Image (tube, helix red, strand yellow):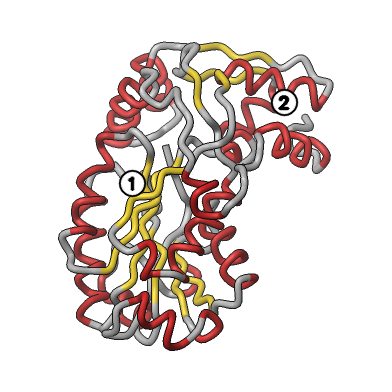
Amino acid sequence: MTRETNSAQGAKNTKHAGNAGNAKGTKDLTVVVTGASGRTGSRVARAAGAAGLTVRAASRATGFDWGDRSTWADTLRGADAAYLVHPSDVGAPGTAEAVGDLAREALALGVRRLVLLSARGEDQALPAEEALRASGADWTVVRSAWFAQNFGEGPLVAELRRGELVFPAGEVREPFVDVRDVADVVVAALADGERYAGRTLTVTGPRLLTFGEAVAEIAAATGRPLTYRSVPARDYGEALLGLGVPREEAGFLTEVFETLLDGRNAHLEDGVRRVLGREPRDFAGFVREAAAAGTWRE
């Protein structure tokens, strides 16, 4: 499941993105990065800049709002490509409509190259993917496994700092992927539209872990007695309501957890190696770096 905290968009040119990339060169491409201060967007912005692309960061802080169409045109106009990540989950209610509307707005402004972050195995994400495909854009979908960084950023961190992670994942195994690998794949898709247009790229980490095993690796790296306790998805949804999460969002998350965490994703994909020509980063590397930075200190 992929979740962000901010958002935005971008792209330009009536040329095919691949032709634009070949004609202009990577260093001449301007890409709008949605969720530029979020979990993936911040990494995409850094990776795109390192690759020589001109980055236009887009978020509410820079005047872009997924919920306000009047902010879209100024963000999109004059760019060559855009990374699209919705501020809530890609399968959340209303996301497909927003993705389709924004993609059509981009096309009307001459933007053709759009890359959407989606979630591997999440049925609820399929309408957003289809909305992008139906828009007429030169599209790429990047389907991601569960982020390794979900253990180090966001709501799970507070629980781990208290010593116990409570989550409805049972003993299902997941190939946790480093967000930096997701970002590198996204940038490759943005920069080389000719190669990746019309493709769905699925990215995972290099090995399978249960959530309990992931927490055990964090415990070993920090020297703290951290534990994992699984609860039913319905109980987790009720707990979210008690924390003030809106009923519609809690209901959606309960539905996602009941399906996404049923073992359907307990296998590896080779998207990182195919796109980047190297093996994906291992979960252990993320844990070492985050532990050294004091992420899980009390």
Label 2 residue SS = helix
Mark 2 burial class by Cα count in 10 Å: few <14, some 14-19, many 20+: many
Count every numbered label the image shows and give the total. Answer: 2
Residue type at mark 1: give it: Val
Rendered residue at 42%/87% (across/down): 23
Q: Is residue 60 visible?
A: no
| Residue that numbered label 2 is attached to | 218
Name the one closer to the observer, 137 or 216: 137
Residues at marks 1 and 2, CA–CA distance in whole angstroms: 28 Å
Image quadrant assignment for residue 233: top left
**Quadrant (top left, top right, bottom left, bottom right) of the N terminus:** top left
Q: Residue 65's spot in the image, x, y percent? A: 36, 66
Q: Is residue 238 visible?
A: yes
Rendered residue at 55%/77% (across/down): 53
Label 1 residue SS = loop
Residue type at mark 2: give it: Ile
Pointer 1 and pointer 2: residues touching (CB < 8 Å)?
no
What label does residue 90 carry, if any? 1
Mark 1 burial class by Cα count in 10 Å: few <14, some 14-19, many 20+: many
Rendered residue at 44%/63% (across/down): 189
Instruction: Report whether 32 appears left or right of 150.
Output: left
Instruction: Report whether 98 appears left or right of 43.
Output: left
**On screen, residue 124 above or below 261:** below
Name the one closer to the observer, 247 or 10: 10
Instruction: Report whether 243 appears left or right of 110.
Output: right
Image quadrant assignment for residue 16: bottom left
Q: Residue 85's spot in the image, x, y percent? A: 39, 56
N-terminal of the pair, mark 1 or mark 2, is 1
